[in-house]
Amino acid sequence: MAGVTLVAFAIYLLYQEIPLNISTWGLWTILNTVNCVTMMRAGNKQAWLPAGYATGAFLITVMVIKNGTWSWGVLETLVLLGTLGALYVSFKVNKELGIVMAVSAMLIAGAPTVYDSWLAPASESWWLWAICCISSVISAVVASGWTIKDRLFSVTGGLFNALMFLLVVF
């Protein structure tokens, strides 16, 4: 459901100019892919939520190239290093710790979007955040166990998307 919503938002961007940060959506593409990989490596055989997010974020990144802004600074560099660290840890040290690192990097990558929405909410994107929040909550509820590999991504994704929904609506 979240992946389809992100694809719909990417199509929506063909017709609406919503200023988005190319580097943020590019990093989210990479981070969601890394989250999917680290969750599968840890034994989650149903990592559909991050796979859907990765697909949708990739399409949004492609659409944002047309009229988005490029902003790369210390935060983006730290997120990229955290992502590489998460991959290393997942493959060489501890699979669950790799998930924690990848999810943490994803949340940090969202900081510029939260800040931008705080300053200038894009109220036309309310449905994106609402449906992604609902998708994350459903994913958390139906997960097979209360483990890092099964619920950390969906619970934190639900909280992040709920925050974004509240910022753009109120």
Image (tube, grey):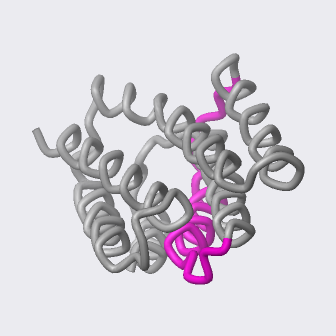
Which residue shows up at 86% across the image and 55% down it?
91
Q: Position of residue 66 (x, y in %)?
A: 62, 52
Q: Position of residue 13 (x, y in %)?
A: 46, 62
Q: Range of the magenta residues?
A: 43-72
Magenta segment includes 59 = yes
Q: Quadrant of the C terminus?
A: top left
Which residue shows up at 46% across the image and 41% down it?
19
Q: Is residue 38 above or below residue 7?
A: above
Q: Is residue 105 left or right of residue 138?
A: right
Q: Residue furthest top?
A: 74
Q: Residue furthest left?
A: 170
Residue 157, image quadrant: bottom left
Q: Is residue 98 above or below residue 5?
A: above
Which residue shows up at 30% across the image and 57% down it?
129
Magenta segment includes 47 = yes
Q: Position of residue 86 (x, y in %)?
A: 75, 44
Residue 131, image quadrant: bottom left
